[in-house]
Amino acid sequence: MLDLALLTLSTVVSPTVQPPLRPLPPSVQSGDTVRHFAYGSNLLLSKLVNRGANGTTIEVLGREPASVVDHRLAFNLRMFPPLEPAMASIEPCAGATCEGALYTLSRAAYEALWRSEGGAMERPGYEEVVVTAVGSDGAPVQALTLRAAPWMRLRRDAIPSERYKGIIVDGARELGLSAAYVQRLSEQPAMAPSAALTALARAHGIVAVLAFRAKQRRLLAPIRSLCYGLLYTGRSRLGRLASECAIALVLLPTALVGATIRLALRLMGREPIAFGPPAPKQEKQPA
């Protein structure tokens, strides 16, 4: 699901202001609880629980493996290549099955989850849809899930980052999804840019953040489209190298601008603009 840590944007509503709960379809509710079907990074329990705003947690009342038939797991939520080319979505697909987690959440907890997935933004990247999920007891139930909104939906699937894919695979194993489904997830191609390309992309991202804040998100759309076209999903080292070099050339001009802005902010003693997924934690070496 959408990881808003990718951008440090001022889209979070003040914690002192609690908006009224929105009406939801009665078919996904039982009393004061809501059924939610998750298929992406929220398969991992710790990921979903820690999505609360301002360090709060989301309380889970129930969780079990489930599946939605005639739907597939898609990676077509447009993001930021090459760091995070695409995030997960669910798409109708005759004959396919999307496995995931059927969560039972309080009404307030579901609202917190929705807002953490971009629901607090003026134009959310996901839209809520109702699907029929079959849980452990084999009984079909209606549940809310999140599908990439039309304006964020790629025409063709891209690939997830290695980081994001790893979270999904870990969640699928933790939940106990079918061995065949976990294997398919494990074999999913993923993007793992080199340190040099990562540095260029993060510097380019500073310009992307400023364009977003200035409501000029379309300004860098041609660059993002080029990066999508240059992504390589094969196993050839030469292919990966050629792809990285081509993407680096595309990002270089704006990366230089972003690096200059970052340096200027540091010289002025101001907080630098952050962009991209969290850097992997370095394990301490034994003394």
Image (tube, helix red, strand yellow):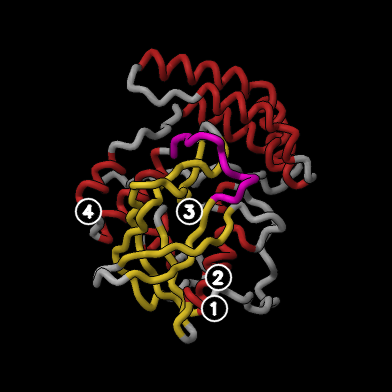
In this rendering, which labeled residue sits more in front, label 4 or label 3?
4
- The residue under label 3 is 1
Question: From the viewer's perspective, is the residue at label 1 or at label 4 nearer?
Answer: 4
In magenta segment, residue 154: yes
Cα gap from disc 4 to disc 3, whole angstroms: 20 Å
Contact (Cβ within 8 Å) of mark 3 with mark 2: no
**Could you give the CA–CA distance between mark 1 and mark 4, rounded to whole angstroms?**
31 Å
Query: Which label is found at residue 108?
Result: 1
Q: Residue at x 29, y 44 (%)?
A: 285
Which of discs 2 and 4 lies nearer the camera? The answer is 4
Instruction: Give the CA separation, mark 2 to mark 4.
Output: 29 Å
Q: Residue 141: which quarter of the image?
A: bottom left
User: Residue at label 2?
Assistant: 112
Contact flag, marks 1 and 3 (Cβ < 8 Å): no
Give above or below for 162 relative to 222. below
Callout 3: SS = loop
Is the residue under label 4 in contact with that under label 2 (CB below 8 Å)? Answer: no
The mark that comes first in sequence, 2 or 4, is: 2
Label 1 environment density (alpha carbons within 10 Å; few <14, some 14–19, many ≥20): some
Amino acid type at circle 1 is Ala
